[in-house]
Image: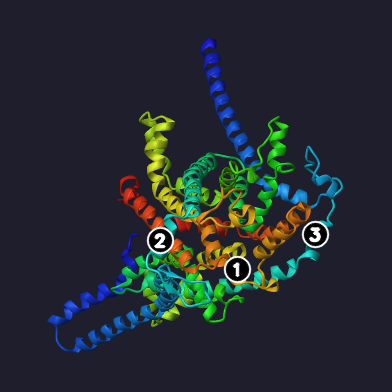
Amino acid sequence: MVILERNLSARYSSRRFKLMTASTIKHLVLILLAISFVFPMFWMMSTSVKPDFEQLRWPPVWIPNPFDFSNYPNAMNFEPFFQYITNTLVYCVLTVVGTLVSSTLVAYGFARIDWPEKNFLFILMLATMMLPFQVTMVPLFVLFKTLGWVGSYKPLIVPTFFGSAFNIFLLRQFFMTIPNSLSEAAYIDGANELVIFWRIIIPLAKPALATVALFQFIYGWNDFLGPLIYLNDQSTFTISLGLQNYVSSYGTQWGLLMAASTVATLPIVVLFFLAQKTFIQGISLSGLKG
Amino acid sequence: MKGGDGDCYYSRRQVHMANVQTEVMSPVKATRRRRNSLQAKRERLFYILVLPWVIGFLAFTLGPMVYSLYLSFTHWDLFSSPRFIGLGNYAQLSGDPLFWQSLRVTSIYSIVSVPLGLIVSLMLAILLNQKVKGLSVFRTILYLPSVVSGVAVSTVFMWVFNPQFGLLNALLGELGVKGPGWLSDPNWALPSLILMSLWGVGGNMIIFLAGLQNIPVSLLEAASLDGATLWRRFWSVTIPILSPSILFNLVLSIINQFQTFTQAYVMTNGGPLHSTLFYVYYLFENAFQYLNMGYAAALGWILFIIILVLTMIVLATSKKWVFYQGE
């Protein structure tokens, strides 16, 4: 009896031991991965507050001593980063408005209203997602040049008012999940299609709209090729273009460059932490419901 | 894409009405006419709603595509008028070593970074899907870098890859390894960028994670009761259920990686020795630095065809390996 019990408890504890080691290993691996993912950003911020003499020290100084924040005002003096950020904010907000207005309406058309050639148009729209921007890059440049828009934000903003395939697709997927019985009931009560859209569909679709707005904002913030092609006056630069300009002129002053990079990424990082749930919901929505 | 039965509740009801009406007398005819005009109204509304996209498609996609095709048969420096040269650009491309180099660079980059990115993001997702303490913290940390992309990331990685004082060689130095010159070494520049691309796998990871959370626990339990090993459960349950997410990530990754540009422009300028001359970088150079608009248009069309063919191949084979639940 005693032997059996001891045997059992030994076996039990060895099993528990196994489970515990497995869980420890899992957590260790994750912690290592997390550290390696965070490290470049940590390194960026750490460099940005290092006094010059510590930057090129070997082995590197991980945590600066003392903290030296002078790189920030210095970087701001060399390059009008504040102006860049204002430009980028205005640009992002306008494209978000354009995308929301156009993509929502188009998506509603695709989701709810029946029409013989709807499927053909829908598939055509999905196909445009596969089209690389570079195919139309040259002719679009020519078009906007003829219109006299090059040098302004118009080539970057106006097209967003005509809907983008990915956002339309995402919103359409969401609209399809709203039960028809809701709008049907409103219809019987005498509401017309637009009232239903505005009073019933839009309030229900708020999470999806937030996702689209967020993705569009981030896209605008990070976009480089578009601004590079269309903007040529430094006072109109977006943050990514301004940062690139800065890199090409101060290529080896790492303290300044990292301060500038921190300024360029911090707003997105803050936004990410504020709206984390929306991000994760949105990205899952885009990938799955077919 | 399943159409969804809710699509056309109106038309179906209307068909039903129409059937009844043919047999019944005239008073109903008024209703019928009203229904028909209602249907017409809804169709009109569809037109109006979808119109912005159609206009945008014609003005910013189809029109430019056709124009681009035309330009690809011309020689044009943007100032004089385009001169038609037939297949001249394409002939020139086939003998242009830089074109082949850019195609080679982009292909190697995609062939390595697409599968590598998928495998790493899948492994991360599986790790996160275990019972882990602090899941949301890990998820945040692993996902965040993919949101912060573009020029700032390129700048940071230029510093990370710095041969003398960068983070990477500092860490290797602590391990007693003398790191390579990374971006300044023609043999290491492209691998450096591939390594860097792994930093942004968070988006794919989230999609996989959502897919993994869709797997019914009962299914895995049933499999393990039947004696399936961990490995077997992975290949016979997890992978098939995840296959739609794999397809989605695969297609988008191919499209994205073939369009790599920012890193080449900011970090390496296509060098050293053209070792990071990405296709789109070469296209950009031709269009906006050498003003070879016709040549650039031809490059654009070839890129389009490559991506189209690759996507079609993936989609065609997907019928064999993608499984949709509930079918």
Residue type marked 2: Tyr
> Same chain for the residues at labels 1 and 3, yes or no?
yes
How crowded pointer 2 is (Cα within 10 Å; few <14, some 14-19, many 20+) is rated as some
Determine which of the numbered discs, if any, sits on residue A72 in the image. 3
Q: Secondary structure at mark 1?
A: helix
User: Are circles 3 and 2 on residues that touch, CB within 8 Å?
Assistant: no
At mark 2, the secondary structure is helix
Image height of A103 relative to B271, above or below: below
- Looking at the picture, tell me which residue is in the foreground, A228 or B152: A228
Nearest the eye: B247 or B96? B96
Q: CA distance from mark 2 to mark 1?
A: 29 Å
Q: Quadrant of residue B234?
A: top left
Does residue B193 lie above or below A267 as drawn?
A: above
Q: Is residue A272 left or right of residue B68?
A: right
Can residue A177 be seen in the rendering of this structure?
no
| Residue B187 locus on image (x, y percent) | 58, 41
**In the rendered view, does A44 fall on the left or right side of A282?**
right
**Please, what is the three-letter code of the amino acid marked with disc 3?**
Tyr
Name the disc covering residue A227, or none: 1
Name the subunit of mark 3.
Answer: A
Mark closer to the observer (1, 3) = 1
Taking the spot 72% from the left edge, 38% from the top edge, the residue there is B170
Q: Residues within 10 Å of mark 3 (few under 14, many from 20)?
A: some
SS for callout 3:
helix
Residue A214, position as x, y percentages in the image: 57, 64
Tell me the residue that label 2 is attached to. B90
Q: State the image coordinates of residue A191 (x, y, percent, origin top left).
A: 41, 81
Can marks 2 and 1 be said to lie on one chain? no
Residue type at the position of mark 1: Pro
The chain that hosts pointer 1 is: A
How far is mark 1 from mark 3, CA to CA?
25 Å
